[in-house]
Image (tube, helix red, strand yellow):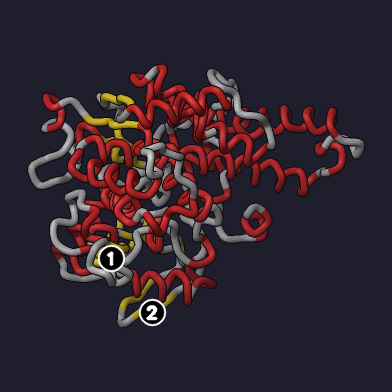
């Protein structure tokens, strides 16, 4: 069983054996890799009653205490119970070399506000503990154990503090603002546990995955400037008035910016944050097209590199695979016959991501605003070290564990035009 680069390895298995369903076993655990969207829908959605549990990660959940993140929980009553961009743009102009940390801080701040109702701090917020969850990036959910008890015991404090500290701060804030008493006094026992786990899950999953999605998009466009230039031209045609004055994009502009949408879609396919998804686990025996799938089998997926779905050169970054000429022949539009990566990336059935719409909106809006204001590119001397000759990401530049993201990389940001500089100055006055 691979411990890194799992998505490409699983995809190679499907291609090698010419099968959309491949099984492997290790250490008493059976894993079924699904390389077909239709099969994923059949098993994980239509037969969700059998396929909605999760494999138990002994290291992450039992030893380190991350069972408060309900994406990792088995399907049960407990699971069913837990179901500022402008500042970032300004900070990026002041300290462009810190873009990696600025993205993480911006998304973490949004997650704190969403989960706990707390205001976004500009820098050095002590609640940004999501930066310190190394285990979730490296432990496959199907792997029994996954590491040493010494490491787990040394780091278990993080899960308790991560779960409790933001809630306690929010609880005190609510106490000062409302007449009904603190939440911890109103909700007790099991209800309080549900509140703690749900808020913790919103914070942790949205902060980490959205951060990595944005960093992956920046990496993709920084290493493929030819596509970035096309997006700049598209943005100017939509967002600039007759005098050339720019405005920031809004979500209502999405249909008018198809090449930008295609670039975002391709970054999610080319550099997915969780390439194999969070595996499902069968709760009873099943049979599918002659395959026996026993109780306790984990299911992962490898569909984002499927040439039958996404066309040739699946390891290359190419947004044009998602577009076609529009009806007028004078522009382009998203090609509905090519599957949207989000239909795969956010999971299937009862375990699909409940925050997918928020995650998609955050990624698109951040990408759109970033490209409206900035040019960014890896130094020419570094580019060959980031992307291989076949278009795939260099393994040395990518953290290819369970949760994937680009390792810190060099990227030069600059305000892209006088009109963008004027818009940025206007934002500074408003803030």
Mark 1, residue position: 35
Q: Which mark is residue 280?
A: none
Q: Residue 196 lies in what quarter of the image?
A: top right
Q: Is residue 378 above or below residue 301?
A: above
The spot of residue 4 in percent (x, y) is 28, 42
The spot of residue 116 in percent (x, y) is 68, 37
Which residue is farthest left? Answer: 389
Identify which residue is drawn at 30% across, 69% down: 36
The spot of residue 123 in percent (x, y) is 53, 19
Q: Residue 413 lies in what quarter of the image?
A: top left
Identify which residue is drawn at 38% across, 72% down: 293
The spot of residue 228 in percent (x, y) is 25, 41
Q: Residues within 10 Å of mark 1 (few under 14, many from 20)?
A: many
Whole-angstrom CA distance, mark 1 to mark 2, is 17 Å
Foreground: 79 or 424?
424
For label 1, the SS is loop
Instruction: Answer yes or no: is residue 150 visible.
Output: no
Q: Residue 369 lies in what quarter of the image?
A: top left
């Amino acid at each position: 069983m691979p411990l890194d680069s799992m998505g490409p390895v699983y995809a190679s298995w499907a291609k090698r054996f010419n099968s959309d369903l491949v099984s492997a076993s290790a250490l008493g655990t059976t894993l079924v890799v699904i390389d077909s969207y239709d099969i994923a829908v059949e098993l994980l959605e239509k037969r969700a009653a059998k396929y909605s549990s999760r494999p138990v990660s002994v290291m992450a959940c039992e030893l380190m205490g991350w069972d408060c993140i309900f994406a990792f929980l088995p399907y049960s009553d407990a699971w069913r119970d837990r179901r500022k961009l402008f500042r970032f743009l300004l900070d990026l102009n002041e300290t462009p070399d810190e873009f990696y940390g600025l993205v993480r801080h911006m998304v973490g701040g949004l997650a704190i506000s969403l989960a706990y109702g707390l205001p976004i701090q500009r820098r050095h917020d002590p609640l940004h503990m999501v930066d310190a969850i190394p285990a979730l990036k490296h432990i496959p959910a199907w792997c029994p154990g996954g590491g040493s008890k010494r490491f787990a015991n040394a780091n278990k404090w993080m899960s308790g503090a991560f779960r409790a500290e933001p809630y306690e701060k929010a609880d005190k804030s609510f106490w000062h603002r409302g007449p009904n008493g603190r939440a911890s006094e109103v909700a007790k026992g099991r209800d309080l546990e549900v509140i703690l786990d749900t808020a913790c899950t919103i914070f942790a999953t949205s902060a980490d995955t959205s951060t990595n999605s944005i960093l992956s998009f920046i990496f993709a466009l920084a290493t493929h400037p030819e596509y970035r230039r096309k997006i700049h031209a598209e943005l100017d045609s939509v967002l600039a008035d007759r005098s050339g004055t720019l405005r920031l994009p809004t979500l209502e502009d999405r249909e008018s910016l198809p090449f930008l949408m295609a670039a975002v879609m391709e970054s999610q396919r080319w550099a997915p944050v969780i390439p194999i998804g969070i595996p499902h686990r069968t709760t009873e025996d099943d049979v599918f097209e002659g395959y026996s799938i026993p109780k306790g089998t984990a299911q992962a997926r490898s569909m984002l590199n499927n040439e039958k779905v996404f066309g040739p050169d699946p390891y290359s970054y190419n947004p044009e695979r998602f577009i076609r000429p529009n009806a007028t022949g004078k522009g382009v539009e998203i090609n509905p016959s090519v599957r949207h990566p989000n239909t795969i990336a956010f999971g299937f059935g009862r375990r699909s991501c409940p925050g997918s719409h928020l995650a998609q909106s955050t990624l698109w809006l951040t990408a759109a605003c970033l490209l409206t204001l900035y040019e960014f590119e890896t130094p020419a001397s570094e580019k060959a070290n980031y992307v291989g000759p076949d278009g795939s990401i260099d393994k040395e530049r990518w953290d290819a564990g369970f949760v994937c993201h680009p390792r810190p990389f060099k990227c030069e940001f600059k305000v892209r035009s006088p009109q963008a500089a004027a818009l940025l100055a206007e934002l500074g006055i408003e803030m």
